[in-house]
Image: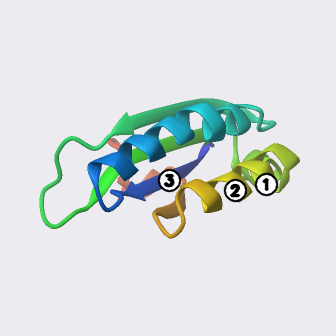
Amino acid sequence: MTATLVALYRRPADDDALATFRRRYRDEHLPLVRQTPGLRSLHVARVTEAWGQSDLCLMARMVFDDRAALDAGIASEPMRAAGRNLREIAPGMATTIVVEPDDEMEPGSEP
């Protein structure tokens, strides 16, 4: 069963700060994340619309084969380096969550 690390990023104070964040995220942060052992896939998307109050501007989804692979990836040096980089380029902007499939909510599952 896959395990997914989701990072949600709040919009910086102004357009210049947003442009700087996006450039540094692309050029510095993502190359570190891509080196994470066990990372099956990485998807990054702009938040273009939100219903309700939201200041989100970017979302990253990192998929691993299972929770053990995710935990090993998080503990790896590339991910630790990515975390240090993120604290520098996006202080206080990120919320990170781990999500796993919920078999009870899948179509065709029994109540």
Is mark 1 in CB contact (under 8 Å) with mark 2? yes
Q: Secondary structure at mark 1?
A: helix
Q: CA distance from mark 1 to mark 2?
A: 5 Å
- Binning the other alpha carbons within 10 Å of mark 3 as few (below 14), some (14 to 19) or many (20 upward) gives some
Q: Up-down: is 107 above or below 104?
A: above
Image position of 82 (left or right of 15): right
Residue 46 % position (x, y): 33, 38
Residue at 85% from the left image edge and 49% from the top image edge: 76
Q: Mark 2 is on which residue type?
A: Gly
Is mark 1 in CB contact (under 8 Å) with mark 3? no
Between 104 and 20, which is closer to the camera in this rendering?
Answer: 20
The residue identified by callout 3 is 7
Residue, far left: 51
Residue 65 % position (x, y): 69, 37
The residue identified by callout 2 is 83
Question: Of tags 3 and 2, which is closer to the observer?
Answer: 2
The residue identified by callout 1 is 80
Question: Of tags 1 and 3, which is closer to the observer?
Answer: 1
Image position of 54 (left or right of 12): left
Residue 20 % position (x, y): 45, 44
Residue at 13% from the left image edge and 64% from the top image edge: 52
- Asked if residue 14 can be seen in this view, the reply is yes
Residue 109 % position (x, y): 38, 48
Q: Mark 3 is on which residue type?
A: Ala
Q: Mark 1 is on which residue type?
A: Arg
Query: Which sits earlier in the primary sequence, circle 1 or circle 3?
Result: 3
Can you say which quadrant of the picture contains the N terminus? Answer: top right
- Binning the other alpha carbons within 10 Å of mark 2 as few (below 14), some (14 to 19) or many (20 upward) gives some
Query: Which sits earlier in the primary sequence, circle 3 or circle 2?
Result: 3
